[in-house]
Image (spheres, rainbow, N blue to C red):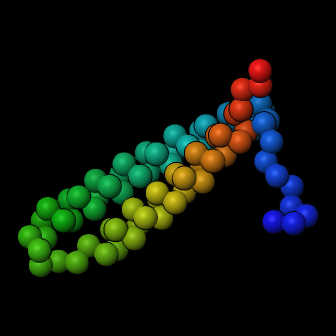
Amino acid sequence: MGGCATKTSDPVYCGVAQTGYKNDLADVNLRLSQYSACVSRSTGSAACSAEFSALQSSQSHLESSANDVRQYCKVTP
C-alpha cells in the first residue's frame, strides 16, 4: 500500500463506520437464515451454492466494516 493513506481514528466517521457495521451484521444474519433454510429444505438434493456465496460476500463486508470500526473509533488514552 505504498503511498496510500492509512485509516486513523476519526470521531466524525466513527458513527458512519458503526452504522455500516450494524447494517452488514443484519445482512449476514439475513443471508445465514436464507442459507440455513435452503439447506433444511434441500434434504441433500439441492445445491445451495448461491445462498452460500451470498453469505460469504456478506461476511466479507462485515469483516471490512469491523476493521473500519476498529480504525475510526479508537479510544485515545
At horizontal 73% and vertical 39% (from top left) the residue drawn is 72
Residue 64 located left or right of residue 23: right
- From the viewer's side, name the closer residue of 22 and 66: 66
Q: Quadrant of the N terminus?
A: bottom right
- From the viewer's side, name the closer residue of 68 and 23: 68
At horizontal 77% and vertical 21% (from top left) the residue drawn is 77
Residue 9 located left or right of residue 26: right
Query: Compared to 77, does 31 lie above or below?
Result: below
Residue 58 located left or right of residue 47: right
At horizontal 44% and vertical 51% (from top left) the residue drawn is 27
Task: Looking at this view, name the residue that lies furthest to the top.
Answer: 77
Give x and y (percent) for residue 73.
Answer: 70, 33
At horizontal 14% and vertical 62% (from top left) the residue drawn is 40
Task: Looking at this view, name the residue that lies furthest to the left.
Answer: 43
Q: Which picture quadrant has residue 42?
A: bottom left
Give x and y (percent) for residue 75.
Answer: 72, 26
Q: Which picture quadrant has residue 31?
A: bottom left
Task: Looking at this view, name the residue that lies furthest to the front.
Answer: 77
Task: Looking at this view, name the residue that lies furthest to the right.
Answer: 3
